[in-house]
Image (cartoon, coloured by chain):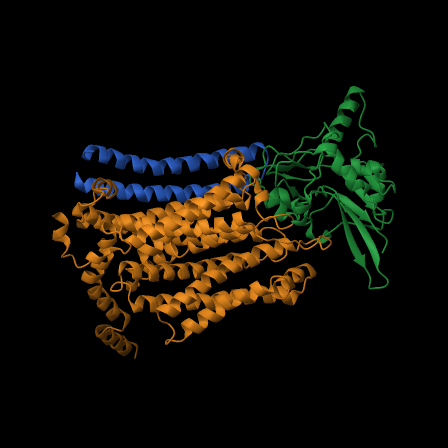
Chain colours: A green, B blue, C orange
Amino acid sequence: MARYGMVIDLDRCTGCGACVTACKAENNVAIVSEDDAKMGRTMFWMKMLVGYEGEYPNIKMKFIPRLCFECDKPPCIKVCPVRATYKNEDGLVAQIYPQCIGCRYCMAACPYTVKVFNWYRYVPEKPMSNCINPDVSVRPKGVVEKCTFCIHRLQKAKELAQAEHRKMREGDYVPACMQVCPAKAFYFGDLDNPQNRVTEAMRDVRGFTLLEDLGTDPKVHYLHAK
Amino acid sequence: MNNKTIVILQVFSVTLIWGLVLSITALCIHLIHVAYRVHDVPDATVAISIIAILIFWVLGSILTYVFVGLHKQRG
Amino acid sequence: MNSQNYKTDEDEVLFRPIYHTGRGFYLIAAVLLLIMLVAGTLYVSQLIYGLGVTGMGEPVTWGFYIIDFIFFIGISHAGTLISAILRLSKAEWRRPITRMAEVITAIVLAIGGLHPIIDLGRPDRILHLVTSGRLQSPLLWDVFSITAYFTASTVYLYLPLIPDIALLRDRGDKHHKLYEFLSWGYNGSPEHKKVLERAINILMVMVIPIAISVHTIISWIFAMTLQPGWHSTIFGPYFVVGAIFSGIAALLIIMIIFRKAYHFENYLRDVHFDYLSTLLLIMSLLWFYFTFAEYLTGFYGHEPQEMRVFFYKIDGRFAPLFWLMVVCNFVIPVILLGFKKLRKIPGILIASFSVILGMWLERLIIVIPSLANPRLSYVRTGVYFPSITEVMLLLFGLAALGFGFMMFSKLFPLISIWEIKEGREESVHNVSQRLKGYFPAPQAMHSMEVEGHHEQ
């Protein structure tokens, strides 16, 4: 089975936020009210983290698009009391919404705080209700959700490949964030295939992962020249 | 309510604790079974289950011991 | 008619609350019920609208409910643990205290055990824990350990209650059938006494490790994650110490209140408060030691993520609460209980209330700052402010504790009557015998001399 991973080149990233928007639209991620946003209930599967380097006046802004890192050794799975999150055969940390009891232990256990919670039932309002993606279910209230690497696209790609009696090719399956990136900062694919561009990018000397020392083995790597 | 109903109710109250003990045991066995089926750290599940089952069985036994002890002398 | 014969019982005061109810009782019960009703309504709205009615958000995904959960389960350590340790160490002064301690445990465990369910986003799916629970999740450990502790402590409350129920049954006044049912045919014969004593002895040895495991496992919910401020090996014992600490304080408060309300002055005497408050003082020092050890190791290592949480507590947003906690848990108890002059009922009451507040703050300071400062430093520091629902549900817990205790006092004696009687009849003799055993007997000294001669 495949082992999907991603590399994001931060030296190419302009921080435009296209990936954030595309993710929200693709996955029907809830849009919350202003009051809720102030309470920290904004829902982002893909979030643009902003860091500052250096002292004034020589400040450099650093943009880090942060999605679920699909860790190879995920701390969130260990603590789930009901098997609502598990690692599937493609190496993705999957979330089963009808199984989740909403204890939010996985959110507390994730060192990257990538998981978000449905504090209310999401009812899409007028303009957004017209562009709900039919491939992705809207989550019920009271469950935890997170980036899935657009797993519905993987399903579609697999079915297409099967129908055409061929193996999956590189580029068949691409998450929404990567597809829209104008700076071409993303690399994505099967990490077990050494010919892929993503595996090549992973060997780049600039590569690093966030909080490497925790031993979670994230499958999303970053490239950044110091 | 005569004496007989009271005795029946008392016996019923002891069966309640055994209901709890047995259902905990059944739950543990079920969880072990599921853990084996989905290959989800079954050894830890077994270890924790053994402790849990043991504690509840001892608790049930103590209560039954008192119940039997108090009723034997009366009859 | 029947009851008049018993007016001569020397422990009649202990039976009184069961047969006589004052107006104050109804008034307080009504107020507590009202609080519970309001909180219940708010909880229904949470069920309908979802957890959005609370103040929680991201990254602070756990709030008052989890804090109250730790707090209430902590108080439950008053009972069974204290009473088991005192019984095991043959402390004779325990006799009028054990019952109240055990009642607190049973009631508070029931309240505390509900809190994780209140905290669930989908309480309707609670049965998923049964159908597909994962025993390797610390939350499941909690389900099992709290169930075990609740069962053990209810049995441990019930068994020493049986002789008292038999006493009530023999009076034949009120609820005759209920006492008949609950007394399990106990008649006070030596055989019956022996059976009961043996069972209590086994239970009290068993209950101590169970009680310790409960709060250790609660601490492991936090310590098993990788979060800064939580991932600490000291957490298990630290939580247990805090639990016993807050438990003794709760026990003292309840003792003082019910001593006043039910005129138990003759039973709960200065010596009981003196000994118990000394225990509270020791726990306060122990708590300080643990807190100091926990924070100093974090500070000395100076790991950046750890320091973010550390300074958030010490001089950041949580500084006022942190230092209030230190004052409540250490400064006030040490001053009020350390000096014999201040260690009187009012001083003890103030110290106990301050410890209860301080220990609740301690739980708050453990849960919130670590969540608010995630390990990933690019994530902004979270804010959390509780909503009215969460505050009311905390009050619900406290009200339910008071209400449950009052209801219990109307059915069963709050002070173990048979243990008092037994103490009066037997322990003076037993203790004097035991005391003699503490010191070298004249005979033994003699034989040692003989042995000495042989060696030469």
Nearest the viewer among C63 and B13 is C63
Where is residue A98 drawn, in percent x and y?
Answer: 60, 32
Where is residue A100 drawn, in percent x and y?
Answer: 59, 37
| Residue at figure coordinates x 80%, y 28% from the top left | A168
In the rendered image, which quarter is residue C344 located in? bottom left
| Residue at figure coordinates x 49%, y 49% from the top left | C392
Is A36 placed left or right of C219 in the picture? right
Q: Is residue C243 above or below residue C408?
A: below
Q: Quadrant of the C terminus of chain C?
A: bottom left
Q: Is residue C335 among what the camera can see?
A: yes
Is C347 placed left or right of B70 in the picture? right
Q: Looking at the image, how many numbered discs can be counted on the residues?
A: 0
| Residue at figure coordinates x 22%, y 63% from the top left | C427
| Residue at figure coordinates x 68%, y 52% from the top left | A214
Nearest the viewer among B31 and C304 is C304
Where is residue C263 drawn, in percent x and y?
Answer: 26, 61
Where is residue C275 drawn, in percent x and y?
Answer: 34, 68
Is C442 placed left or right of A128 in the picture? left
Q: Is residue C145 among what the camera can see?
A: no
